[in-house]
Image (cartoon, rainbow, N blue to C red):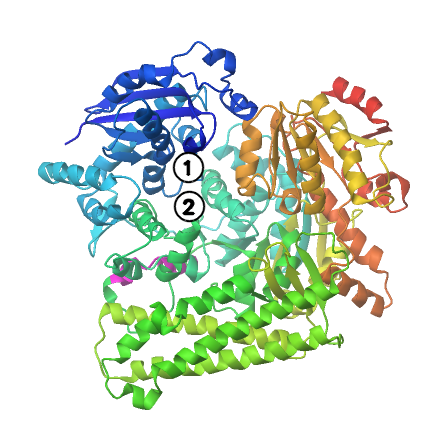
Amino acid sequence: MLNKFVVVDLETTGNLPKKGDKIIQFAAVVIENGQITEKFSSLVNPQKSIPPFIEELTGIDDEMVKDAPFFTEIADKVNALLEDAYFVAHNVLFDLSFLQEELIQSGFGGFYGSVLDTVEMARILYPTADSYKLSDLAEREKLEHDHPHQADSDAEVTAELFLLFLKRLAKLPAVTLRKLLPLSGGLKSDLQQLLDELLSEIENQKEPLDESVEIYNGLALRKPHEETGSNENKNVFAYPADDTEKLEVLRKGNRTYTKRTGQFEMMDAVYMSFQTKTHSLIEAGTGIGKSLGYLLPIAYFSKQHHKPIVVSTQTTQLQEQILKRDIPELNKMLPFQVKAVLLKGKSHYLSLEKFFLTLQDENDNYDTTLTKMQILIWLLETETGDKDELNLSSGGLLFWNKIKNEAPVFPQNHLWNDRDFYKQAKAKAESSDIIITNHSLLLSDIKDEGTILPKYDFAIIDEGHHLEKTAAQFFGHSLDYFSTRLLLGQFGQYEQGQLFYKLEKLLEAFPDSHSELGHTSQVNEIVTQAVYEVDDFFKLVGIFAKSKQVDSSSSFRTKIRFSYTDKSKQSKALVHSAERLAFSLSDLQAAVEARVEWLKDQQKAYTDEDETIITDLLTWLNELINLKNTVKSCFMKATDDVKWVEIDFRSPQNVTAFMAQPASVAGTMQEKFFSVKQGIVITSATLTVNHSFTYVMKELGLDPIGVQQLVIPSPFEYKDQVQMLIPSDLPEVNAVSLDEYVIAISEQIISLAEATNGRMLILFTAYDMLKKTYELIRESGFLEDYVLIAQGITGGSRMRLTRSFQRFEKALLFGTGSFWEGVDIPGEDLSCLVIVRLPFSPPEEPITQAKCQMIEEHGGNPFTEFALPEAVLRFKQGFGRLIRSETDRGIIVVFDKRIMTTNYGKYFLQSIPPVSIKKGSMNELIKVIQTWL
């Protein structure tokens, strides 16, 4: 066995060795027999200047490498280090490509030994990690990483990580290693060689299996968690009605608990709402401790009445927090134990049977191979089988569709029954006191008349400000080009070897099938026609959108309303194309249905592989039927839905969609939810406009009579913690062109950044303005010392961008959309929040247009009844980003002067906690900032 590993890291002048980029630092750590035996590092003279970006990233400048050796001077040492060793690096192909180039130029033959990639290994061995960046992995494993982007520090951390990976591999059950071994042949590195050597060692040692793992039908799985003792406590526990009783309960689990009057008020309101079977709206300000504010009373209520309570949230993050942090804390406090379960839609759960069958497949692509290896490791850890635990690539998500849990077509193989993750989750939900779910599943249950969640009468809707928009999306329809073509591509034409090819191969076992069902070529023709109609339909969607585009200078994603009353030739052509598409999809459905049903009717014992193909075909057929019904709903049925096109003219093949949503969900929610449930509590930090719930009640269809309404202000001292500044030397946002406004605010942002040392979150209402501002500031060169992170430009999820922002001392984060509410940056990481303009929805937004028309038709005022309250709630959400704890201090700068110059500006200010407001020129405000911070 090769017992020598050399972990290498390089810093370079760029990414392309073939185009002249050079090494500026080389570092290697040698590992032999599981121990670090040697370290070597050297700066390298690249014989060219180091670009400013690389200098900023690495801290290495031209002066430092001026007297350093050329690579040729250290090449002999490097070559000696690598002899008879595995070459190990974090993103190995990058380091290897540079080293090969330099070694060859130095007269050595290059390195052609075995390579291992710690990124690849991390993805396999840490399948649930948020990120596979070296610094994030180091943080996860609590490894010291003092100088990221310096080769010596990076190589040492990579070596320590690699040693952890070796230990992890050595502890894997032999069953898992045997499954990983054939798959590892499809990787980019030589992990197969390492696994082969490891497996030989493990099988010779015959180590006992870890107690937490069991072998089940040839797979190593984490043992299911055994429920200890009976959950039924026959005692009846009285709800702690007064403050003393509450304190006694809470301090049992947390001795340092400090009384929060608002939290106690919320507890009583929730308990009374359920006791009196009334609906409630509770706005709970930041810092109340909202989760505990409803969890404690519902725990008592559930135990007293033996009724399950549903807790629904919008975000996965909050669900995880409730289940993994809040419920365990609650159980330490209560005189009884609360059983809670997180329940998601069926397709979130892995089907072990399907996954096991895919392990026999050959010729997988790279992403599928990697995902299979991730899942084999994950099965040793997961108790839930929930996809959201995994960090999958986009290719991995495609593979998930083949292995997700679905309704069985054939009598199930009972071998896997006891370890059906979805059945386990459903069974747990049936016996739980608290069922945690998301708004989408809650709405699915409403739509399917209670067939998904266990029967319940009481629910908490947390993050309740999202419920109306989620319901509108849920009760609507969408057609997008990318997923429609993907669906047809999954079936494919016969010669493409996809589902259609597999179907015909199954039929070949029955010689008379084609005489009954028609020839393969006939179905091929139907597939070709369907693909043509899809392409034609979306081409006409683009032509329609182009004909209605008002501002052709805006090159970003555009929304254009579609209406039956529009008799233009583009609109008529689109409707006719939709009708042809629906008929074409019906033809395809009929042809495939006939074939699949014929196969099901044959008295034949199919192999597992055959059954999987037939199940995949039926799943695909369901999706095809949904697609056909969506086309019909959007174009061939009379509905009151608002319809529009969403398109990005820069890449229409990626972003072209047709959307339909109800303008109001109030009637549906009242009829199917609020009128049939006994007690629903909707809570959020942002539900009122100027201390009134009128807007949210109207949107959701809640009758104000009989609804308990409570506003609990935040305990934070905003007057002492926040200064609101409004610059007077900016133009009115609507009085100048976009480009002029961008120039003006860019100057202000640069001044603010210098005064606050960065640590700024800048919130925009439109991506167009965000992009132009970001580019102008970057190109100005005034903030060269600052890291500029921009949504949609820098790349990565909201969580990843936020983490990057927190990592740098001098950083600016540019956000729009979800950044108005989905960002939590406590402490000094965020000192300054900038609101570029008041967050009114654009009047041309199709949903906004439709809601305003509806209000006008009923004799109302669209601005005061919809546009203003919606903007105020969004403003409150943005404001809430700044102060996340009682010790936070910060500045909020509002560039939009309308907050002071218009009559409606006061509604924004009256809807947030009282704060100190100062207005003046930017120079005057900079002095305030310097004194304040």
Separation of marks 1 and 2 at Cα, in angstroms: 10 Å
| Left or right, 204 with reference to 161 | left
Task: Work out whether 535 lies above or below 207.
Answer: below
Whether residue 614 is visible, yes or no, is no
Tell me the residue that label 1 is attached to. Answer: 132
Q: Is residue 527 above or below residue 679?
A: below
Residue 619 image offset from top left, x and y in percent? 40, 70
Query: Quarter holding the N terminus?
Result: top left
User: Magenta stretch?
Assistant: 416-429
Label 2 neighbour load within 10 Å: few <14, some 14-19, many 20+: some
Magenta highlight on residue 532? no
Question: Can see residue 624?
Answer: yes
Three-letter code for the amino acid on which mark 2 is drawn: Asn
Position in image of residue 282 (x %, y %) = 68, 49
Residue drawn at (67%, 36%) of the image:
774
What type is the residue that disc 1 sits on?
A: Tyr
Circles 1 and 2 in contact, beta carbons < 8 Å? yes
Residue in the foreground of this view, choosing between 503 and 834: 503
Give residue 391's mark: 2
Secondary structure found at label 1: loop
Query: What's the magenta bit mostly, secondary-structure-wise?
Result: helix
Tell me where residue 910 appears, x and y as whole percent.
82, 41
